[in-house]
Image (cartoon, rainbow, N blue to C red):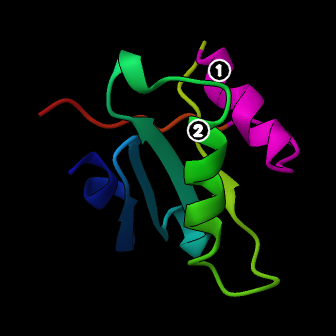
Amino acid sequence: MRSREHRTSVEVVRDETGLVTIGEGLVGCREMSVELLSETQRSTTAGRALIAAGLRHVPGGELVWAQVSPGNAASFRALLAAGFVPIGAETLIVPAP
């Protein structure tokens, strides 16, 4: 639901370990986020497998931005292992209701 608040054309790829959301985010860039469904599903390979599954839904050669919650080192390591390269950070500030 959060992804659809900030992205358009959202696609969700899911398996028993978690889900990947892919959509068009800020300035039309393709964005991906990964969420493991439970602590018991966390392993060194579960996140990487979800990332790979999500990337199979992106047209070849298209750039993908990945989002990692601040302090989520495991997610950051999984993205690095999948070939992502850190180039900067962005902060989405949403006005209070």
Circle 1 sits on which residue? 74
Whole-percent x, y for residue 65 in the image: 68, 56
Q: Residue at x 88, y 45 (%)?
A: 85
Q: Is residue 68 left or right of residue 82?
A: left
What kind of residue is marked 1? Answer: Ala
Checking the image for residue 13, the label placed there is: none
Circle 2 sits on which residue? 47
Whole-percent x, y for residue 76 in the image: 70, 29
Vertical comparison of 6 with 24: above or below: above
Q: Residue at x 27, y 35 (%)?
A: 95
What kind of residue is marked 2? Answer: Gly
**Mark 1–mark 2 CB contact (< 8 Å):** yes
Whole-percent x, y for residue 46 in the image: 56, 37
5 magenta-colored: no
Q: Residue at x 51, y 48 (%)?
A: 33
Q: Quadrant of the C terminus?
A: top left
Q: Which residues are magenta?
A: 72-89
Of circles 1 and 2, which is in front? Answer: 2
87 magenta-colored: yes
* Residue neighbourhood size for the residue with mark 1, other residues' Cα within 10 Å, grouped as few (<14), some (14–19), many (≥20): some
